[in-house]
Image (spheres, rainbow, N blue to C red):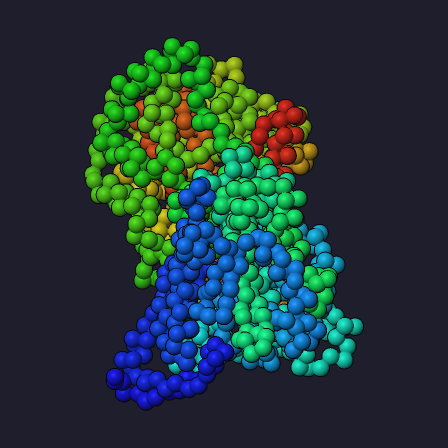
Amino acid sequence: EGGEGGGSSLEGREGRDGHGTVSVMVGDRVEMLLFSDQRELMATGRDRDTDNNGGGWISAASGTLAKLANYFADKVGTPYYYSQMASYALAAAKGARSGDEGDKDEIVNWFLKRQRDPVTGADTGEWSGPQVRNQTLYSSHSEVVKRLAELGEGLGTNNHNGKCYRANWLGIQRLNSAPWPEAPWKGIALGAPQEDHAFIRPLITKLVGPGGKWDRTWVREQAEEFFKGRMGINKGDIGVWVTRVLHKVHVGITLTEAEGEEFMDMQWGMIKAIAFPEGSLKNQRIRDMVGLDETLAKKARWLERYKPALLLMLPDELNGTSDDQMTHLASALFDSLAFAGGASVPSVIWFCMALPYSEWGETNLPEDFSLDTVSTIPSYVYETMRRFPPVGTLPYIERGVNGAPDHDVMLNIQMAQRDPSVWENGDKFVIRSMAEYHTKFCGFADFANSPNLGSANSHSCPGKDLAFAMMTSFLTEFVRTADRVDGGHKQIWVCDRPPSEISISAFAAGGFALTYDVTQLVQEEDQSGMDMLDELTSAERSLLMERVSATNKFDECNANTALFIKIVQKIVKPGNNKQASKDVRAVFFNKQSYADSSWSAPFGGFRFITCDEDEERESRISALAQMLMYAASKRWDLKEDEQEDRLIWFESPAEGVASMHQTFGPHLPPQYNEWDDVVTDEGMAWLCVAGCAGWHLTKARTEDEAGHAVVEGAVMEVDMTYMGQYKTRGSWIRYGGAAYLGQSPGDGLPGPLLGIYLCHYDAVFRPSDDKWEHAKCAFRSTVTTGLTLKDHLCTVHWIKANGLGMAAREATGPDHPIRRLLKPHYYNTALINFKSKDMLLPPGQFAYRTFAFTKGSWVQYFADCASNWVYVPLPEKLAAKNLPSEFFDTWPLGQDSLKLWYTIESYVKEFLTPFYPNGDDDLLADDHVTEFWSSFESQFDTPWNLPPLSFDSLTTLITELIWTVTGEHELVGSIVAYLTSPIGFPAKLLEDHVESDVQSFAQGLVIIALTGLRQPPLMDDWDHVMRSDSWTALQQQSVLDAVRGFQVKLGKVADQNDDDNIQRVKNGGRKVNIVNPRILESSVSI
């Protein structure tokens, strides 16, 4: 009925007892009905990352095939076969069962139903199917092994004299011949005629068999290389790794990852085509729908690439070989790469990875099993293949005798591997001895050697040892990445889905992704300040906690502070403060000016872009921004809050800590640096060399150089006297001061704290003075204020991070290497800087209230910070401190920072070099680079005064930018360890006092808690934002190698930090973790 189109003829031989031509009406309405399911199938594509059990794919495919099957000559056999295949596919897609009595997998029940005696109900081990006639499927282990052993002899010595032959089948699936135009037998190499097989088999065995073009050491090295810098794993990653390894072994070609993905895309195109009924792909509409012609063109290019490579791999064996034979061999190797090892090996690895993370694995893996026990991996791989076989059947055809038709035979390896007469608890997952697998396992068709692996009549898997080496090496290296972690691989490789969402069926494991959580390699310290509670007796502590629970003095804070406490408790959720690289979408706005989409600050000429390409409406930061804007819209009266006689005080520092623990404890950022002692002279000395104050450590000045009194005998000082010029409100003391240290005893240890100069008093205080404890507290107040406002907020956020983001987005396009390189490092920067301004900038708002400046001095302070800023890369900055060389060379803070800086520099060079192979000549010809460089001179009122542009100076600038938003941001911004006690680092202080009032303590905790909204870690999987279709394959591979190599180098820096800390403690020092790459974020947070 109907359509406007004309007829089209589908010709093809179907079965052995009938052939001919059938005409089919083809029009819009007919095509819509016939191919609707197929369109859906093609539209789904191949999602390697989130592949599920295939239920949706199978339903679409089986529905399509069932419709198509009605249009062929064998109107009984074809529909019957495809209906069986649809039923088989749906059964296979259903979830695996436990294997308990009566709880068998649906696919097992599917076979048992068909091979039971209809009268007795006994399992016969045979079934006359899946075709309607002339076919038998054997399922018993004994029959499968017997027939495998007899297969070689039965194949004969030429194409015609054997008792049996193989045809174009893959397992239980009959294949379409259209995908093999280059092969005279028009099919997969597994079904090649005997004479062609005799030519191909020995050559493939020389490539992939034992003693071939590989060895176990090399395979292990490939697995090690895969995990170097690998911070994330999904199913597609494993497929690409297998494709690359197998290409190197089969044809000696080293593929880039992009080429591996290209091959897998073509592989998927072949898989879409091979299951169509024979002859159907002669219809151009169907060919177009499947994309067959495009796929075959790609295949032809791969085959042409293989042929010269094979001559280099097997020069003696292929000497004098005809071009036709080379094509046949290349076709056979393609089949091995696409349908044999290329499909089976990643499938088994993925099953092995999925089972421990799945609900099925939690229930059915042996109780004493752990993938982290490397010695059990070989047996685990074998049991996985036995229980979830990548190859279900081995087919061949017995020639008919005396006019009888040929008879198809299916050896059901899947069921033979569960035969209860051979395998005890065959339906359950049981780790067995390797001896048992070697004796009974038939998944590699080992029994089909005739007589040797490389013999012409052998049909076992020639690459068995290679496949097994790849599987076990990959899993071994996977678990070794967790060697240093308590809890093993599941502790450090975090799954993005709960076990209940990882489905396990007979032939597929569901999709998920793993992320390497480097923070598991760094011990999180207890909250500093809690040691005060440890000093109490159990009864005293219980009583204090009960009292704080009943009457928490933070509840007495004014309405402004109370609102911000509630914001923290609402947004910064316990256990919900981590982001990952996967949260950074590969979204890039076009290169453009944002002058009309920016907000200008009232000082310094700062401009903040108001739209962020990473902003999501439901993000935590967006939610925080909404609350901050609401809080900023309120008007607050300061007068009564800060009258000295109205301030609230804790009865003891312990009460303050207990109150902090109850109100803020779960909402504070993780602490990797413990500072329980910031009060004693020794603790203060350590603060100046290994703590946050060390950022300002320099050689001590003379009185003439300083312009004020200094302490006699001082060798080094922490100078923050610049802050003394700014007025403070009410009774709060002025900021500004300098701490003086004596000679270091060596090994980076601090010298004694000799004295402190305070601008408020214009006097030096020494340990013997009455105001000594107050002087130390006042200096700590200066340090926390200066670091937070000048170093963290103004320098890191507003100048350098803001400059990084503006230059990248306004001067470089989405595919420019600099834009891609910097993407992780400006993630959410525009959003954070712009939307937090209402809280941090205006006089009268929360940041202003937290600190003691007057309105005039508040604005002037930031204006001066901006105008006095100078661009100085870290190595020059540290050298300019003029610290004694014997101290500097072992100074933990300086040396750790330099190691990280130079590691970043190496990464930047490796990333950019493929794009500028001729160095400065290529670089200066890139208009985006020159625009990027010049943009820094006009971003705010103070120019950066960069040196002349060159590859080296560009590398230095980008290195400094990345260091700033990672290491420097952590060093000057992560100060939670100092703020968790009221006697620690008050943001503002009264004369003669040595602790913070309740409200000031709360305000400091609010600000530091908001930094708990952490950005993705520096050590993470960044591959997805480092890919561009506009780059060449070599450029793309070089970038990925650089990105992963950077992760490897960061890991080495972190390991060195751990080792150094052990030695530091032995030498009488302390651990310094502040720039350990494992705790660093990729971009600035709040």
The N terminus sits in image quarter: bottom left
Q: Nearer the viewer, residue 74 or 945?
A: 74
Left/right placement of residue 610 relative to residue 302 reads left
Query: Relative to 23, does residue 530 appear above or below in the rendering?
Result: above
Location of residue 521 (image quadrant): top right
Q: Residue at x 50, y 43 (%)?
A: 428
Query: Relative to 976, does residue 43 appear above or below in the rendering?
Result: below
Q: Which residue is drawn at 34% across and 17% down?
A: 545
Location of residue 727 (image quadrant): top left
The residue furthest right is 316
Q: Is residue 638 something that shows in the picture?
A: no
The C terminus sits in image quarter: top left
Left/right placement of residue 724 relative to residue 344 reads left
Q: Which of 108 and 777 is in front in this view?
A: 108
Percent from the top left, x then y, of residue 580?
A: 44, 47
Percent from the top left, x then y, of residue 172?
A: 50, 64
The mark total stands at 0
Percent from the top left, x then y, of residue 351?
A: 51, 50
Q: Residue at x 29, y 75 (%)?
A: 33
Percent from the top left, x then y, of residue 302?
A: 59, 74
Location of residue 183 (image quadrant): bottom right
Left/right placement of residue 1049 relative to residue 782 reads right
Q: Residue at x 64, y 64 (%)?
A: 151
Query: Relative to 551, does residue 456 appear above or below in the rendering?
Result: below
